[in-house]
Amino acid sequence: MVMIHVALGFLVYFIPFSSKLYFICTTFYFLYQIINASTANKAKNVVFACCYVVGSEVFFRMTSGNISYEAAKYLIMVYVLIGLFSNGISNKSYSYLFYLFLLIPSIIVAYLNIGLESNFRTNVAFVLSGPVCLGISALYLYNRRIKLNDLIESLKYLSLPIISMTVYLFLYNPSIKDVLSGTQSNFETSGGFGPNQVATVLGLGMFALSVRLFMKSPSLFLRIFNVVILGVISFRAIVTFSRGGVITAILIILLFLFSLYKKSSLQYKGRIIYTSFIFILLAGVVWIISSNQTEGLIEKRYANQDKIGREKEDLSTGRVELFLDDLQGFKENPFLGVGANGAKELRLKAGQGIKASHNEISRLLSEHGMFAIIILIILIIQPLSLRFSNKRNLYFYAFLGFWFATINHSAMRIAAPAFIYALALLNVQYEKRPVRRKRAIQ
């Protein structure tokens, strides 16, 4: 499967039109798998399909393979709805249905404030497709049972298209040094696409490969194989010069390792420590190579300096200003907010250009008013209350951490934070060890 996806990276680069065929084939393949799966296996196939969509979204955007910009979010919703109609929902998941209803007032306010002259449907869909995708996914996956091995397998599905994208990035930009111009996020090293989105998905790939390194590498060959792929993906993530995705990846890997170590036996803890040394060595090698290829500029980027070593005034690269603008919108419209996509429209009318918020929390407050507070309470309290009664999801903190970190640096521009949040709500089942019975004495 890995080599097939390496080949797909080559194919899409040399035959650009094949990206659309790739998108269409995977769409109908997973649709077929979900529809034909038995009721017992339906949820597993939905998770596999959605993880693949999450991993491939930015690659298809980058190569113009998808049929629409938000295709991944809509596709996830379609897959999840098929599963939902087949399996139903948990009685305790209705708070997410309430969450979905809380999004409706912002549409009405947007219509009253903006009208139809600003491409109303497209603008509203742009900001609400992510939250709706999250709500529908959470509604279906809340307390949904899945085997641990199937959840680990779903992370493999997540990583496969990311491997294709990584191959494409090397072909698109084989020499990092040739496209360096400063310490800002670099579009050329990101496949000509948004570095923030590319780094975020590559960061997810780093996490998925780290999980496989620690949990699915029983042989020396597999360990070396996973280390090499992890190192290559990490390198391409770093040289995008977009810090958010890389820092988020490091955070969720640490959260995963903490949970894994805490849950492991004494013998397995020793294996984790041993693999951690390999992991740290790999991180050092990747950083040295990245520094060499960027002629030291990557170190200045993370030190918040420009290319000649002067400290930049704004560490957030304009995000704080947008955050404060959103809070001002909430202050002026505390009850109903400025409406879906209203914050961007107001900035446009004020002559500030088309600037969309990078922070989902401030955007919610600005555009949904007091309903945003209820929305945030549901999104934070509901998974924590589930965790209080069910601590079997080994990746709970990593998944929830990814969602929270990503919505604070990249909002919900991609489907990843929406669906990864829902994965934190799964009820993970562990394989029961066979019981050895003593023979009865004759």
Image: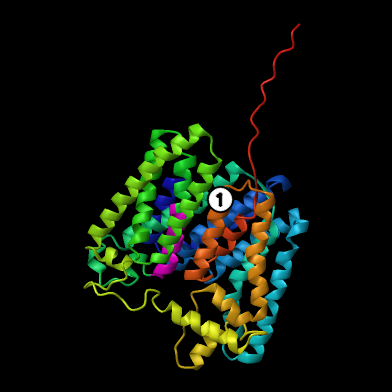
Name the residue furthest right: 91
Q: Residue furthest top?
A: 442
User: Is 370 above or below relative to 132?
Assistant: below
* Element under disc 1: loop
**Residue 406 highlighted magenta (yes or no):** no
**Amino acid on which disc 1 is placed:** Tyr
Q: State the colouring used for the structure image.
A: rainbow
Q: Residue furthest bottom?
A: 350
Is residue 126 visible from the viewing direction of this image?
no
Residue at label 1?
Answer: 395
Choose between 373 and 195: the one closer to the eye.
373
Position of residue 379 relative to residue 91, above or below, is below
Which residue is drawn at the image coordinates 39% and 68% (left, top)?
A: 195
| Residue 5 picture location, percent across and down | 44, 51
Q: Is residue 200 magenta?
A: yes
Report the magenta stretch's main SS: helix
Q: In percent of the image, x 63 and y 50: which residue is there?
A: 45
Q: Which residues are magenta?
A: 193-206
Q: Position of residue 310 (x, y in %)?
A: 25, 75
Q: Does residue 94 appear anywhere in the picture?
A: yes
